[in-house]
Amino acid sequence: MPMRIWRPQDLDQSIEIFQRAVHEIAVRDYSLEELRAWAPEPPDVAAWSRLMEDLKAWTCEIRGRIAGFIASDRPGHIQLLYVHPDFQRMGVATALLDTVIADAGLHGVHELSTKSSRTGRRFFEQAGFSVQREEQASRNGVSLQRYVMTRPLA
Ligand SMILES: CC(C)(COP(=O)(O)OP(=O)(O)OC[C@H]1O[C@@H](n2cnc3c(N)ncnc32)[C@H](O)[C@@H]1OP(=O)(O)O)[C@@H](O)C(=O)NCCC(=O)NCCS
């Protein structure tokens, strides 16, 4: 999978991936009200721009299109992981996770962690993560169930 560091020029495509992944993939696991709170339409592009400035992120680019992206706020902690609906179940998230594992290794971090959606939980479990606890995240006044998950690194 062709991986590279995320660039500010990737912002529009990344936001589109986020919107579509939430509304077309996570739709299996959350109500319409929850999806609208998680990924409101239209998206707040300025807020996204500020968020991405504070994160270290990587993308997977296939035939000139961004297939997905992953972002960390600190080594080993996955803050965002979204794959375009056209590129699901092709190993994109697995390859993106490998970039975070490599980065964690460079920084001497011994544990991966994330706060996963119900949708992401199945991916993270098969990648060796286990649920530490369940919690509610508040998004635009709506409560969304998510899972605190970790995986030890050798
Ligand atoms: C979760 C997500 C990132 C996975 O991306 P992906 O590129 O399709 O994942 P991969 O192809 O690397 O999947 C690897 C394995 O994880 C498991 N897996 C992935 N998605 C799964 C699903 N929806 N249901 C069950 N298992 C799943 C499978 O074991 C899969 O292997 P297989 O396809 O050979 O069966 C993607 O579905 C997504 O963007 N979801 C919506 C947004 C979201 O909730 N993101 C997580 C935010 S915390």
Image (cartoon, rainbow, N blue to C red):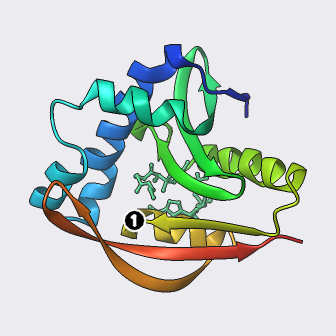
- In the rendered view of the protein, which quadrant contains the C terminus? bottom right
Q: Position of residue 47 (x, y in %)?
A: 32, 32
Which residue: 48% across, 42% down?
83
Q: From where the camera sits, is residue 31 visible?
A: no
Residue on which disc 1 sits: 117
- Tell me: residue 140, above or below residue 17: below
Q: Secondary structure at mark 1?
A: loop
Which residue: 78% across, 54% down?
101
Q: Position of residue 143 (x, y in %)?
A: 20, 69
Q: Which residue occupies the foreground of this view, 31 or 151?
A: 151
Left or right: 91 with respect to 98?
left
- Quadrant hosting residue 27: bottom left
Left or right: 38 with respect to 13?
left
Decide if ligand 1 comes within 8 Å of the CB at mark 1. Answer: yes
- In the rendered view of the protein, which quadrant contains the N terminus? top right
Q: Which residue occupies the foreground of this view, 93 or 75?
A: 75
Which residue: 16% across, 54% down?
140
- Tell me: residue 145, above or below residue 16: below
Q: Position of residue 121 (x, y in %)?
A: 48, 70
